[in-house]
Image (spheres, coloured by chain):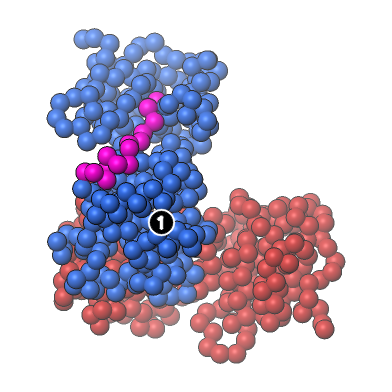
Chain colours: A blue, B red
Amino acid sequence: MNGTERPDLALLTNPTSDRVRSIRKLSGRSARLRAGRFVVEGPQAVREAVRAAGRSSGEGPARRQVVVHDLYATVEATHRQPEIVAMAAGAHLEVRLAGPEVIAAMADTVSPQGWIAICDLVGEPLDGILASAPRLVAVLSQVRDPGNAGTVIRAADAAGADAVVLTSSSVDVHNSKCVRATAGSLFHMPIVHGEPLETIVEIAREAGLRVFAADGAGDLDLDELQNDSASPLADPTLWIFGNEAWGLPGRSLGLMDAVVRVPVYGSAESLNLATAATVCLYASARMQRTLS
Amino acid sequence: MNGTERPDLALLTNPTSDRVRSIRKLSGRSARLRAGRFVVEGPQAVREAVRAAGRSSGEGPARRQVVVHDLYATVEATHRQPEIVAMAAGAHLEVRLAGPEVIAAMADTVSPQGWIAICDLVGEPLDGILASAPRLVAVLSQVRDPGNAGTVIRAADAAGADAVVLTSSSVDVHNSKCVRATAGSLFHMPIVHGEPLETIVEIAREAGLRVFAADGAGDLDLDELQNDSASPLADPTLWIFGNEAWGLPGRSLGLMDAVVRVPVYGSAESLNLATAATVCLYASARMQRTLS
């Protein structure tokens, strides 16, 4: 038995050590960019990161590269989630044991429930994604709320989308609230970030994707599109979702093939961004599978 | 011009007054129950509360009773949202002017952006709702996160649902995070709370509603149901959504006419509760409008 097959027995107990301080600093975006790393908290997200890292380093076609550098857990957490310990061993990752106060000091806003992983920032080049003949891509344009962004990444994963793209002015996907809201989907879905909307639309159109924006004032009704037996929703599609408060600016709407509204049948002014995006992505997923 | 037509000129400036303290206490559930009142924060929710109160007190068919007792705003807020001041006058409600520190002291977790209303707790009797031939009702069973509950209320309103029912063990809809997440829909939708799930299902079935539960392990696929030209989704339906972590207990699933899963086409383990509920409610809304 070597060191990678069981948890390290040297327990970290100092919540003010240099190691803990340097990890804690990764709660800030500029520190993450400098280090090229971010913090993953909680058993669900850590499990998916370790699983993806195992695929990346092991045999078989690795869908995408996920690099886990360090893995920390409380003794209790290794007993609660022995499957993460086993997966870590399979991925040649050492689990460093740490006291609960150390894990808490490493974490940002949420309870880490005994697990912390330090990973390389995620992100893939836009042209590579769009060259791989995707059928469904979600774009978040100037989305600022990390919970919304993470929820859309999770929903895009569930709807079988090929990638999620965040424009250069959107929230950082490595924000701890965003990572938590993705519920592990950050490590399933190819993520692109840092490109302006105009570039994304241009490359998508060259790749043969229809470009739809979701907007409450759109001239096409999503439900009517779903009831159309020759619906464009069945075609390969790039969906663009705008800011929580102001949506998409008028000059951006002009770039689209169509602006689609989720119909409001009751008295609500609008839908929450993440729920509207989910309805659109699922409509496309169903129509692509039904009509194609 | 009488006192109800323009803001009261006596500015409240003491954030530690008895009045402010007693309002601040309403952030606790037991204090809300004792007082029979809750705090509504922010211009969007306050606007919808005042609008609904105006309908309740005025002519025309009042869909439901919304009672606003007190209305507080900063001078700046009355300039930013003069339409709320006008609506308040129409509803014979006085706007009490208060300093920003007073408004902040009255509010709970979120920035009140200059507006606070004190309203009667909402809630209607279950049998009254189900006797009114509803076509679409959402039930939240043991849903504990106020943001999720509020987002589902907003989505149910958007999908044209007739009511939202919260079981006795669910979060309090008057929680400030829940109120905020409803984005005003708390004052559009009839809300029922405090009934056990078994009673809700029994009365719904007597009222002729199909009873569907949403569950990731359900045996019916929502997308296949949408592709069925004789789909039961077109019938009057009560949808039941379970707890964020554990869903619906097995004995509850046995009460349903069907357990329906939102299909997961990608690698996500599941959807977030509020997004899954939105997809189900919109599927029903579309099928009811298409096939009926």
A169 w.r.t. B158: above or below: above
Instruction: Name the chain under label 1.
Output: A
Q: Nearer the viewer, residue A259 or A204?
A: A204
A147 w.r.t. B118: above or below: above
Which residue: 16% across, 75% down? B229
Q: Tell me where residue B41 appears, x and y as whole percent.
A: 62, 60
Left or right of A31 on screen, residue B283: left
Magenta region: A118-132
Q: Residue furthest right?
A: B10
Q: Quadrant of residue B278?
A: bottom left
Q: Tell me where residue A85 appears, x and y as whole percent.
A: 28, 24
Q: Nearer the viewer, residue B258 or A225?
A: A225
Badge 1 amino acid: Phe
Q: Quadrant of residue A113?
A: top left
Residue carrying label 1: A241
Which residue: 36% across, 46% down? A165
Q: Tell me where residue A175 appears, x and y as whole percent.
A: 46, 38
Left or right of B153 on screen, residue B262: left
Q: Residue furthest bottom?
A: B60
**Secondary-structure class at tag 1:** strand
B68 w.r.t. A18: above or below: below
